Amino acid sequence: MEGLHYSVSVSRSERANAIAAGWDGSTLSVFETGKEQARDAWFLDSGDKVRCFAEDGAVKDGKAVVTGAAGVNKIGHNLHELEPAFEGTCFGPGVAAVFRSLGFRRPLAVQSMYIFKNPRIGGEVNPHQDSTFLWSEPERTCVGAWWALADCSTDNGCLWAVPGSHKAGASRRFMRTGDGTSTVFDPPTADPLPTDGGVPIECPAGTLVLIHGAVVHWSAPNTSETARPAFSMHACEGAEGFSWPADNWLQRPEDVPFRALF
């Protein structure tokens, strides 16, 4: 993982807030990293769409108690292609140069997310490895580009990561079941990911953090009075010899293939 300063326009946050403002609570898909999302097609069919996912704290007894942007956990998973404010960042020369420097030959943008981390309601993100959810074969090649859209500190739920944890690799998968309508982890249970030695990634707005797919990382709840928004885009190698498994949770229609960064 490494960080560098990268220019990010405030228009991304303006656009995300406009999208989330239209969320009225009628679609109650609560997103929690590390939990099975077997209960709803809203999540499973979002690979080529732009959809809002609720914060756990915005829902009570199966009903939304906080609506609009204040109750949204994130927007995903195709902002990078469907929303110009995000497309220009993801497919610009700066991002291409970053992924070239990492040795990618044909990086495919597989998903993107705007994460609100709203004040007081922005929940914890459990320790996880991105390659668990974005699995490529024969090697795990996922790299996340994560932009801080506000100053990030331990007070407002910044990222935490375990240096060197990527060396152990990622072996657990989050995948669709045979009928494609639900999800499972393989293996079903696993030892907790190591968090000893974790360090906070405190950084100013505009910082780009690169996250290796096997790095163990997480974030605490945002207990502050201000939001801590971020935008992330994940890419996997799409050069000859690499494939995106048909049982990955994130799938697209055949006529909407992943787009290469270069």
Image (cartoon, rainbow, N blue to C red):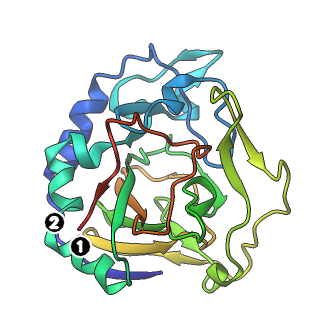
Taking 30 as reference, is 231 left or right?
Answer: left
Q: Residue 34 in the image: state x and y as whole percent.
A: 67, 49
Residue at screen point 22% across, 40% down: 82
Residue 21 falls in which quadrant of the image? top left
Residue kind at label 1, given as amino acid type: Ala
Residue at screen point 37% across, 67% down: 145
Taking 219 as reference, is 1 left or right?
Answer: left
Residue 35 falls in which quadrant of the image? top right
Q: Which residue is mark 1?
A: 96
Q: Nearer the viewer, residue 139 or 11?
A: 139
Number of labels in the image equals 2
Residue kind at label 2, given as amino acid type: Gly
In the rendered image, which quarter contains the C terminus? bottom left
Q: Residue furthest front?
A: 240
Q: Which residue is mark 2?
A: 92
Q: Residue 42 in the image: state x and y as whole percent.
A: 49, 25
